[in-house]
Image (tube, rainbow, N blue to C red):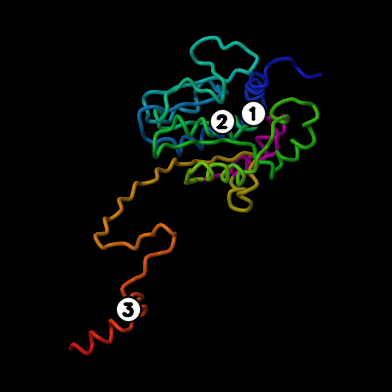
């Protein structure tokens, strides 16, 4: 029987057990490699799966953690918001982290548009998602009917998410897959299969259970146009292009002959 708890709360509880805790640890280790290279004044994490520990390695001093509340719930406190309506000014955040947010929202495009709004130019968005082309994707197919997260979510391929970012004008600067072990609840088996992590990175790097995508918000430069001092052909009232000098000579051959005779 499906729990009446909000899906984000049930997802958070899943990440506190096995195998969620193992996956979250692997994702944090990967973020520890990427976050120190992203600079700025403000970094925002949408979705409190880990109480903000995913941002520990960031050098950005001002860290914001917003939890997501459902549409029919009342937000309590200053750190809860709707995923598509962030209480943040436009062009004010340097980095936004989305840990498994898109899979559990009705309109992921709307969320990405909101992220585009709050990011400064050249700012970065980091997306963590479940990979459907993996052992985790098989579990998703087998267990989705139970309507329990994470299996009840919509697993999007990394290529599809990158297409969405491209449509918004983002440049994808990094894509990595991780966690090649099956989502077993047995901690002993999870430890025994740890060798698959190194093996997977070399043999089948695109089959990891989770992926990380980093997109950079591009700014379209304003290219100044040079002033042309030459007289440009213009349209006369009838809509016909005004003839050039050469065309005028062809239309008035007598004038051309007279000129030659005079010389």
Which residue sits at x=27%, y=62%? 231
Q: Is residue 15 above or below residue 231?
A: above
**Residue with the mark numbered 3:** 249
In the rendered image, which residue does mark 2 sit on?
Answer: 111
Residue positioned 79% across, 26% down in the render: 146
* Residue 100 at x, y percent in the picture: 60, 31
On-image quarter of the N terminus? top right
Q: Quadrant of the C terminus?
A: bottom left
Q: Nearer the viewer, residue 16 or 116?
A: 116
Q: Would you call the spot at circle 1 few (<14 residues within 10 Å), some (14-19), or many (20 or more)?
A: some
Question: Of tags 3 and 2, which is closer to the observer?
Answer: 3
The answer to whether the residue labelled 3 contacts the one labelled 2, judged by CB atoms less than 8 Å apart, is no
Residue 81, horizontal then vertical, whole percent = 54, 18
Q: Are marks 2 and 1 in contact (CB under 8 Å)?
A: yes
Can you tell which of label 3 and label 1 is closer to the viewer?
A: 3
Q: CA distance from mark 3 to mark 1?
A: 70 Å
Question: Separation of disc 3 and disc 2 at Cα?
Answer: 63 Å
Residue range of the region highlighted in magenta in the rendering? 175-197
């Amino acid at each position: 029987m499906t729990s009446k708890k909000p899906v984000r709360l049930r997802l958070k509880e899943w990440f506190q057990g096995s195998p969620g805790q193992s996956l979250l640890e692997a994702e944090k280790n990967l973020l520890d490699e990427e976050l120190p290279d992203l600079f700025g004044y403000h970094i925002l994490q949408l979705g409190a799966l880990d109480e903000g520990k995913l941002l520990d390695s960031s050098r950005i001093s001002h860290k914001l953690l917003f939890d997501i509340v459902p549409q029919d719930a009342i937000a309590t406190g200053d750190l809860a918001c709707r995923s598509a309506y962030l209480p943040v000014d436009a062009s004010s955040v340097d980095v936004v982290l989305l840990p498994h947010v898109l899979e559990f929202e009705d309109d992921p495009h709307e969320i990405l548009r909101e992220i585009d709004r709050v990011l400064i130019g050249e700012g970065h968005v980091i997306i963590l998602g479940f990979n459907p082309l993996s052992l985790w994707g098989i579990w998703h197919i087998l267990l989705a009917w139970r309507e329990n997260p994470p299996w009840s979510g919509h697993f999007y391929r990394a290529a599809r998410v990158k297409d969405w970012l491209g449509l918004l004008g983002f440049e994808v600067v990094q894509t990595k897959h991780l966690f090649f072990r099956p989502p077993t609840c047995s901690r002993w088996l999870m430890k025994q299969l740890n060798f698959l992590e190194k093996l997977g990175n070399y043999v089948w790097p695109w089959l990891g259970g989770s992926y990380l995508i980093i997109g950079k918000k591009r700014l379209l430069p304003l290219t100044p146009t040079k002033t042309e001092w030459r007289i440009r052909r213009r349209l006369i009232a009838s809509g016909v292009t005004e003839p050039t000098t050469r065309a005028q000579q062809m239309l008035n051959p007598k004038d051309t002959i007279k000129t030659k005779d005079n010389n």
